Amino acid sequence: MTVIALIAALAVQAAAPDAAPPTSAIEGTWRSPGGNTIITIAPCSGSPCGTVAWATDRAKKDASKTTAQLVGTALLTNLEQRKDGSWLGKLFIPDRNMRVTAKIQTLGPGQLRVSGCAAGKALCKAQVWTSFTAALPSDTSVPAPK
């Protein structure tokens, strides 16, 4: 291979887009504790976001006071990973029409601790979401199975 051909090959390789970065530990499909919602965390405009993929009729009714369509609503936005491995961003609480500071921590395989705080750290609540690998349920009248 000539020097020119080698340089050209290296230039093409350098200009080629990198392979997709490995997915973060928070990306995937997650079941809320009561099984009333299933959230998908995936890349959105450069950082992960969490979108409602499925919801029970009751969850939809509770959210309908402030959100016309719960399924498809972004619950987690502006997520940025911190040095300690946790994630910070915003959490939308549909039935209260509130956006609060969100923190996500991996607890181990298949578990996320999702917490939201309003008024600084005065009003905080946390839930443990579990990985959901089954097909989305067709019956929205009952919670999703574990």
Image (cartoon, rainbow, N blue to C red):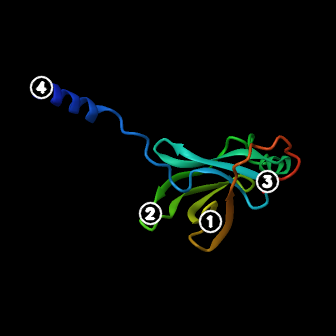
Q: Amino acid at mark 1?
A: Ser
Instruction: Give the secondary structure at mark 4.
Output: loop
Question: Residue at horizontal 16%, vertical 25%?
Answer: 5
Tell me where residue 15 appears, x and y as whole percent: 28, 32
Identify the residue at the far front of this view.
Answer: 1
Closer to the N terminus: mark 1 or mark 3? 3
* Front tag of 2 and 4: 4
The reply to whether the C-beta atoms of the residues labelled 4 and 1 are less than 8 Å apart is no
Mark 3 lies on residue: 36
Tell me where residue 133 appears, x and y as whole percent: 69, 49
Q: What is the C-alpha distance between the residues marked 2 and 1?
A: 15 Å
Question: Residue at horizontal 79%, vertical 53%?
Answer: 36
Mark 2 lies on residue: 82
Closer to the N terminus: mark 3 or mark 2? 3
* Front tag of 1 and 3: 3
Closer to the N terminus: mark 3 or mark 4? 4
Q: Residues within 10 Å of mark 4 (few under 14, many from 20)?
A: few
Q: Amino acid at mark 2?
A: Arg
Mark 4 lies on residue: 2
Residue 69 vertical position relative to residue 4 in the rendered view, above or below:
below
Q: Which mark is residue 115?
A: 1
